[in-house]
Amino acid sequence: MAPEGGAPDFYTIGYSGRTIFSFVEALMAAGVASLIDVRYNPVSMYKPAFSQRNLMRALGEAGIEYIHMQDLGVPSDVRGLAAASGRRDDIWEWYEDNVLPRYSRNLDWFFNSANHPVALMCTEKDREDCHRHRLATALERQGLSSADL
């Protein structure tokens, strides 16, 4: 979580329930310089404005850098297995076993991949319902602070 009275080290944001305009406005209000897209596939069938090309254009017009980090996403086959089992915990367990170990040992990727402050983006409005929560928690264990937009 963000330090009392200070800016967080990074933000998280989901686009569900937002227009592209309100999404970009939230990033700008927080002073975000780079958006790291942590979706495995940077495409949105239900909100095409958030597909990679359209999102890049909207962010570029606002002066915000766009970075897609597929390795931080959850492949559709893993999401499908969790949907079949009815257990979202299957996704979290897979993520903690297969993705986080590569990144939590070395935070250079986070500090050197983007202009700061950064926001980690995925689909879900509530970060507790999204794998970006697991990523944010891992970064917080390393001493960083965050805030959800």
Image (cartoon, rainbow, N blue to C red):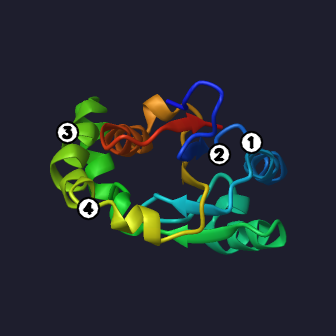
Instruction: Spot the residue most to the top.
Output: 4
Q: Quadrant of the C terminus?
A: top right
- The reply to whether the C-beta atoms of the residues labelled 3 and 2 are less than 8 Å apart is no
Give the amino acid at mark 3: Glu
Q: CA distance from mark 1 to mark 2?
A: 5 Å
- Disc 3: which residue: 93
Query: Is residue 43 positioned above or below 133 on the image?
Result: below
Amino acid type shown at disc 1: Arg
Question: Could you tell me which residue is drawn at 72 percent across and 66 percent down?
Answer: 64
**CA separation, marks 3 and 2?**
24 Å
Q: Nearer the viewer, residue 25 or 116?
A: 116
Q: Are circles 4 and 1 on residues that touch, CB within 8 Å? A: no
How far apart marks 4 and 1 lie (CA) works out to: 33 Å
Q: Quadrant of residue 107?
A: bottom left
Sequence order check: which comes first, mark 3 or mark 1? 1
In the rendered view, does 59 fall on the left or right side of 12? right
The quadrant holding residue 61 is bottom right
Mark count: 4
User: Is 23 positioned to the left or the right of 1 in the image?
Assistant: right
Residue beneath label 4, please?
Answer: 106
Give the number of the mark in front: 4 or 1.
Answer: 4
Q: Residue at x 62, y 70 (%)?
A: 66
Q: Secondary structure at mark 2?
A: loop
Of the two numbered discs 4 and 1 on the same chain, state the one appearing first in sequence: 1
Q: Which residue is mark 1?
A: 18
Query: Is there a contact, CB below 8 Å, between mark 1 and mark 2?
Result: yes
Q: In screen coordinates, is 121 left or right of 138?
A: right
